[in-house]
Each structure stands twice: as structure tokens, then as C-alpha cells.
Image: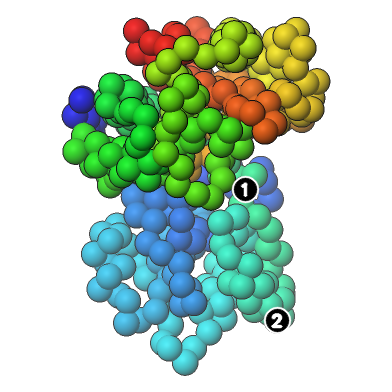
Amino acid sequence: MTTVSRPPSIGDAEREQRLDRLRGAMPASGFDAVIITPGSNMHYFFAEAFYESERFVGVLITADRIVFICPKFEESAIRAKFPMASEMAFWEEHECPFALIASLLADNESRACALDPECSYGHAARLFDALAQRENPVLCGSAAAVIAPLRAIKSQAEIDLMIAAMQLTLSVHKTVFEWVKPGMKASTVIAEIDRLHRAGGADGGNSFCAVQFGEATSHPHGVPGDPALEEGELILIDTGCTVDGYNSDITRTYALSKLDSEVERLWHAEKQAQQAAFDRAAIGTSCEDVDKAARDVLISHGLGPGYDLPGLPHRTGHGIGLDIHEGPYLVKGDKTPLAAGMCFSNEPMIVVPGQYGIRLEDHFYMTAEGPAWFTQPQEDVYRPFG
């Protein structure tokens, strides 16, 4: 099995560029301040996600200030995790952090503030209340429209980290295919995939793992239980890991022995649909048009239409990066034009209710010339890795 060769982590210079782009986008969106809270957006801008608890931690960003806000007793932890935190604002245990934020916004003469969309409702509601009590209330809305377009376009450094993660997970898939056999329980396979990811150099073990056999493959994200693989059953394994926080996510569907001809036919229909989505992806093409390309193939095979089953019950793909699912999405209604640097899953699953499901999932990233695969798609139902 391959051991991942880690590309360089995202450097300070790139994070400074991200902050510059954020600040540049704020005026056009009508905001003069943004608050980032624990989660992937904090990771994106400051290299650490920290964690959300009942005690508020966040970062206030304006045109000329970056202020890290935290409980006073957490100062040492914040300084250790965020060495760039030159300006900090503290609140004591008996104080309200949201009143502190309101005062900081008043000092900056802010009139409109954008809040991290990952912020919990509990914190958001208390912040809104504190801002509403000001003599000159601050309008507050979601920062999604400011942050999402920045995160949708990946740099080469981000793509390199995902290439490493994807190649590691593909190697894990290949090793498991050569090892798995009838009689093994799903939990045994999951544990081995976790071990292989750890041995290969992922941030940890599996970031997620679904191992499904036979009829269970007809449930897109599986069902409870721990079945053992029986002779002649279809195998669906969907797993991934992270490398420096960036995700992989690959699904393979195969069999160890001969399948019914109808299953074989639909396996090839799935492969054609996946390839059609890839072929439709071009700079300027809408996300929803890529989804339509996959569905048109499935309709030609008598599946669907729309989300009808047998057929494809969900979108064709999702964006990927620091979050395993992030926008934009390859789905009807998402009219976002494809642009260089965007990264997507390509997984137009076929579900035959109560019988089986087939999902082939690989990811591609957009270049100026068109799409490029992170991993080469599965070639055959019985020889998935050539």
C-alpha cells in the first residue's frame, strides 16, 4: 500500500492572501466586519479550527483589524494555536462575550456585520440581541455569500493536498479489494480501512467509512447492522481521510464472483453516467448542467427520471475541500458556472430499491483547459483496479 508523501502545508503567505480577498469582498456585499467562529472557516483563514463550546471564541475581521476574542483563562491556548493573534479581546467568566463584540464593532464604527454561517444558533441569537441593544444597532447577516466564493476556488497548494489524500484512499481501496473475502463482517473491513489510512500517513484514521454488502448497497449511506459478506454479493465501500485537513472521498462498487447480467448492465450504465458528467464539465458550464448530463444517460437506460427509482436519488456531486461536502453542488438549480480551481465529487449512484445499489465516486478539479481527475475511475466490476 502507498504511504502518502505529504505536500507542504498551506503557508502564511497564502492565508494572508485569503484574508486580503475576504476584506476585498466585504464592501460589495455591504459588510464592514466579519466574525469567524470555530470550524472549517477558522481553519481556512487561520490554520486552526479550535472548537465551539458554550464559551464563545471567535475572530473579528475589519478593514484594518483582526481581533481574536476568547475567555481570559483561554489566553495561553489561543496564543499557542494562533501565533498570529497580535490583537486579542478577553471576557471573564461572569461577562457577556457578545456585549464585548458589540463594543468592538462600536469602536470600529461598524454598521453591518457578517457572521460565520457555521456559528451555532445559540451564539448567533445572543449576538443579534447584543447588537440590537446598541444605540445605533448593527445589522448582522450571514457571511456565506462572502466566504463561499473564496473557498470554492482552490489554490494549487490545496489541490496538491487533496491529490495526496485521494491517492492514499485509492491505495487503501486497492489493498482492501485484494484482502476482503466472504465471511468477513463489515466492522472488520472498516477497522482494516482505518488501520491502513493511519499507516499511510493520513491525519488520523478514516474520516468516515461505509462498508455495504448485498441489499444494503441499495441504501445510499447504509443501514444499521454488521452483516458478514456472503458469496456472490455486491460490495460497496465509500471512505476517505484527511491530509492537513483536506478531504478524500472515494467509492468503489465491485464483486468477487459473477453477478447477474442485469447488475452488470447497470454497473456499466453507472460508469457511462459518471463519464458523461466529467465530459460535460467545462469552464463556464453550469453545475446543474453537469448533473443533467449524468441523468440523461441514466434515462437512456430506462432509469429515473428525476429522483425516481430505480435511478439516481440524489445530486450527482458536491464540492470538496476542508469540508467533505461544500458548495457549489452538481445539482439541479445550482447555476454556478464552473471555474478553474473548483473541485467536485462525481457520483451519480444507481439505486434499485430492496435489491442493490451501484456508486462509482471519483473527484475532479477544474483547470483552464477543463476537468482533471484526482483519481482514475474504476474500469471493471470484477477488476476494479486493472
Q: Is residue 153 above or below residue 20?
A: above
Q: Considering only vertical position in the picture, is 254 above or below 123?
A: above
Nearer the observer, 124 or 2: 2
Q: What kind of element bears circle 1?
A: helix
Going by the numbered disc 2, the residue's amino acid type is Gln
- Nearer to me, 274 or 50: 274
Q: Quadrant of residue 337?
A: top right
**Is residue 201 visible to us here?**
no
Give the CA separation, mark 1 to mark 2.
25 Å
Residue under the image location 61 percent in, 73 percent down: 122
Residue 30 image offset from top left, x and y in percent: 69, 50
1 and 2 marks in contact (CB < 8 Å): no
The quadrant in which residue 10 appears is top left
Q: Which mark is residue 144?
A: 1
Q: Is residue 164 left or right of residue 286?
A: left
Q: Position of residue 311 (x, y in %)?
A: 71, 23
Q: Residue at x 24, y 42 (%)?
A: 195
> Mark 1, residues whose alpha carbon is within 10 Å: few (<14), some, or many (≥20)?
some
The residue at which mark 2 appears reads as: 133
